[in-house]
Amino acid sequence: MSSSAPSLSSRERALLLLAGATAASVVPALWRRLQRRAVLPAAAVGGSGGVDESRSTTSSAGGGVGAYETRKAVDEYLQFHYGRPEDIMPYDCRPKDALRFTAELALLCERHCAALQDFTGERGDPMAVDIGCAVGGASFELARAFPHVLGIDYSQHFVDAANTMKERGWMRYSSVEEGELTAERVAAVPEDIDRGRVRFMQGDACNLPAELGPVDAVLAANLLCRLPDPSVFLRHLPSLIRPGGVLVLVSPYSWLPAWTDRQRWLGGFRDEDGKPVWSAETLQSMLSGSFTLVEERDLPFVIREHRRKFQWGCSHAMVWRRN
């Protein structure tokens, strides 16, 4: 924000250093002059001419001076500077715990899947589906326990990258260090994972193929709040998972109109009576008829922006067993 402050002439800086009555009479007039000189972008000024009171979902991290001229930015920084530790970080998990995110996702599926405990062979080889698989990290981790894994993602670019990881086992990527400085690194699938157990396809979570299923495990990690209509996806799950199968839903519930129309959010708002609606409660209401909730936990994740800045999140993990 320092770049947006009005600059002072050498005479003005000298006046600000004056003591006594002279400074006391000069400073108010100088301050009024500086206020007139500072012009805020029109879009950043609310109707009262002050801070925009809108609860925009755009974070101040987006950049540009206008991002700070909102009530949301003021609230974020009041908490940043003055918030109590328990208000800012109400979780026990540490930042480095987030580095095992994909492995922990797979373990949740493995621990509760009945088909993996069946040694009679009557059920056939267990199959897991990773919906919203991105570039395939959790899909490969699932292959440690599941003989057959299908990763599905809406992004063809993500699917192409996941297939490269399957075929070659590695892929180069660029990691931002600072500004325009980058470092070239290599992503690699752990050597003890059988990549031949995994395949990937492009698909829509809200319009899954009719022939898909029933399967033994479905993983949907950080997916719900990126769907245009999460209820459509959820209604399809009972027919997708066979009895005894497991559903692992993991989400930070980051509802944004850019991804999901406000009318289709599962939570994060108040109902007509002013009562808060929480996503986890909506999920329990929608799924409890066909599934039994067997585990809940906080699951941290981290996305690196550059070497000194990270997006640390803590998703809510719910593990459901198909009745």
Image (spheres, grey):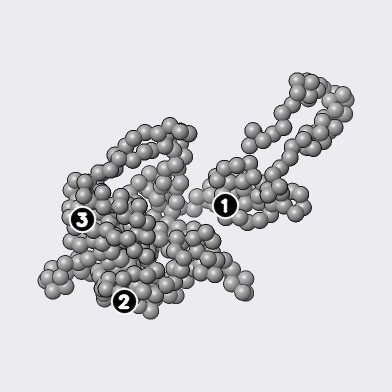
Q: Identify which amino acid the numbered label 1 is placed on.
A: Thr
Quadrant of image for the N terminus: top right
SS assignment at label 2:
helix
How many residues crowd mark 2 within 10 Å: few (<14), some (14–19), many (20+)?
some
Q: Identify which amino acid the numbered label 3 is placed on.
A: Arg
Residue at the disc numbered 1:
58
Tell me the number on the disc at residue 192. Answer: none
Residue 105 lies in what quarter of the image? bottom left
Q: How many marks?
A: 3
Quadrant of image for the C terminus: bottom left
Tell me residue 91's x, y (percent): 45, 52
Q: CA distance from mark 1 to mark 2?
A: 37 Å
SS assignment at label 3:
loop
Tell me residue 119's x, y (percent): 13, 68
How many residues crowd mark 3 within 10 Å: few (<14), some (14–19), many (20+)?
some
Q: Kindly check if marks 3 and 2 are in contact, taking CB atoms under 8 A apart as contact.
A: no
Q: CA distance from mark 3 to mark 2?
A: 25 Å
What residue is shown at x 43% (from left), y 53% (from top)? Answer: 314
Residue at the disc numbered 3:
144
Tell me the number on the disc at residue 239. Answer: 2
How many residues crowd mark 1 within 10 Å: few (<14), some (14–19), many (20+)?
few
What residue is shown at x 33% (from left), y 49% (from top)? Answer: 100
Closer to us: 268 or 318: 268
Closer to us: 226 or 113: 226
- In the rendered view, does 56 fall on the left or right side of 279? right
Tell me residue 46's x, y (percent): 72, 52
What residue is shown at x 35% (from left), y 46% (from top)? Answer: 99
